[in-house]
Amino acid sequence: MRLTLHIWRQRNAQEKGRMVRYEVPNVNQDMSFLEMLDVLNEDLIAKGEEPVAFDHDCREGICGMCGFMINGVAHGPLRGTTVCQLHMRHFRDGQELYLEPWRARAFPVMRDLVVNRSAFDRLIAAGGFISVSTGSAPDGNAILVPKENCDRAMDAAACIGCGACVAMCPNASASLFMGAKISHLGLLPQGRPERDKRVVAMVSQSIAEKFGSCTNIGECEAVCPKEIRLEVIARMNRDFLRATWTGRGVSRDEAEQVSNNSLAESRR
């Protein structure tokens, strides 16, 4: 099959980018999308041209490294799939595809389809962890956890931090990502002591990183490769409201400041 690709090319973070057209003949339908780009890059290198830069690592839908917009949809048209898991048999012969990097203020474009997602790292550093010493592995029956909580925590922990939720959200909100991290820690006994402090710290950091506010549009859930559900955002909001109203885990002045900043951001 033959494809026409329109790919965003940008030399570095300072220069302006543009769409460049490429013809890719003899595409095998069993190729993954990234393998198809590998073939294109081999041709470009053979011609003495710069290859297309894109993030990738495990190519098994686990690491969260790969990701860009395909015809305006994060990770492409297939639900519950990363770009590396997307195969060319899902496209038609002669189809034109437009490839663009994630578009978000918090994810500046570094080169071509590569964006800087270190804002996610800073969100995790702000509160996405458990600081208490857990010691050696306890007996499986020492701490009883309801199965419903275990299931919900494991579902939320499936988040791979790819950033598709931010890229697809009209507000560039990181609420699904934060909600997943807050849920998978807060639903388990080990994460409850820092539950209030965690949510206030992560929401405060998200405001500092210029992520937008959630308006429940649902585009994030639609493109999440691990199909994280919107309920994690509701749980995050509930934890945030409880923490800011009661002041548990944070000072009242700090809680009030974060709450006011969040409200001001949502009105922009």
Image: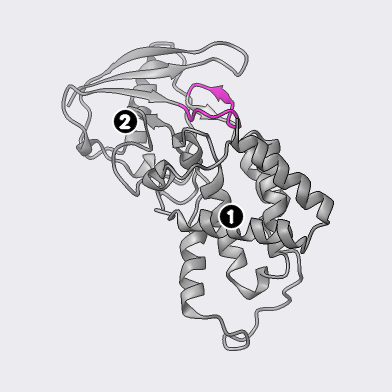
Residue 150 point in image, percent of width and height: 50, 73
Q: Residue furthest bottom?
A: 141
Quarter holding residue 71: top left
45 horizontally vs 173: left or right: left
261 horizontally vs 157: left or right: right
Q: Nearer the viewer, mark 1 or mark 2?
A: 1
The answer to whether 111 is drawn above or below residue 161 in the figure is above
**Secondary structure mostly taken by the magenta-highlighted segment of the chain:** loop
Magenta-colored span: 101-112
Q: Quadrant of the C terminus?
A: top right
Circle 2 residues within 10 Å: few <14, some 14–19, many ≥20: some
Q: Is residue 261 magenta?
A: no
The answer to whether 175 is drawn above or below residue 31 in the figure is below
What residue is shown at x 50% (from left), y 28% (from top)? 103
Three-letter amino acid code at disc 1? Asn
Residue at image mark 2: 36
What residue is shown at x 31% (from left), y 46% (from top)? 79
Residue 255 point in image, percent of width and height: 77, 52
Circle 1 residues within 10 Å: few <14, some 14–19, many ≥20: some
Nearer the N terminus, badge 1 or badge 2?
2
The answer to whether 19 is drawn above or below residue 239 in the figure is above
What residue is shown at x 83% (from left), y 56% (from top)? 251
Quarter holding residue 185: bottom right
